[in-house]
Image: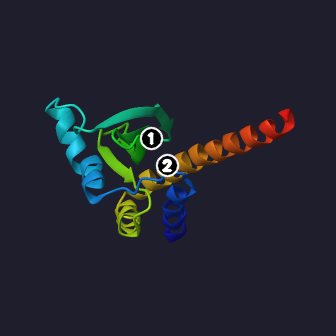
Amino acid sequence: MKTLVCLLVLCPLLSKAQHITTDVEYNYLTKEYKTDLVETKGVKPGYRLDKLIWEEPVDNYTFEVSSLIKLDERQVAGILVVAKTKATGNISYICIPFGDQDLLDRYASELSTLETPLLKAYTLFTTIYYSGLIARDKNTELNSKLIK
């Protein structure tokens, strides 16, 4: 299980994002965002959420992925993964941070508190998603070299 958590911690390091996720952004995605949804406040001022994946099913869960965009920097500030348990409707809000080791440690720690079936589904989901992104980027690079 620790190996799975370690692999998940490394996933954000594959990103080319330059913005370093702040504590405020991390807390917003993991705690405050769900309150804003209930109260229909909209997204935190100065940011927007761009959906990347809508309700992707894995085992007994669905996963939605959005990027939190910091508007004044035009940079991705973090990744929000919303994990829903199909049977119970329980929802987990997970932030994948960029560049801040303390937040990466916190992310790993929070993942380790997820129930085992959810963690396994999350691991499978993120592995498939990140490997697809890596393959797409590499294929784009290879194809651009063939054109020249």
Decide: marks 2, 1 in contact (CB < 8 A)?
A: yes
Q: In which quarter of the image is residue 66?
A: top left
Q: Which amino acid does label 2 sit on?
A: Ala
Residue 88, horizontal then vertical, whole percent: 30, 40
Q: Which of 135 and 61 is in front in this view?
A: 135
- Name the residue at 82% across, 40% down: 145
Badge 2 marks a residue whose secondary structure is helix
Q: In this view, which residue lies farthest toward the left? A: 39
Quadrant of image for the C terminus: top right
Q: Quadrant of residue 128?
A: top right
Seen in the picture, residue 52 relative to 78 is either above or below; the reply is above
- Give whichever of 114, 139 is nearer the camera: 139
Q: How is the image coloured?
A: rainbow
Residue behind mark 2: 121
Q: Which of marks 2 and 1 is nearer the N terminus?
A: 1
Q: How many labels does the image show?
A: 2
- Give the x, y percent position of residue 55: 44, 31
Checking the image for residue 110, the label placed there is none
Q: Name the residue under label 1.
A: 60
Badge 1 element: loop
Residue type marked 1: Asn
Who's the residue at 42% across and 44% down the image?
Answer: 75
**Which residue is depicted at the point 33% across and 41% down?**
72
Residue at the image position 38 percent from the left and 36 percent from the top: 86
Q: Position of residue 25 (x, y in %)?
A: 29, 51
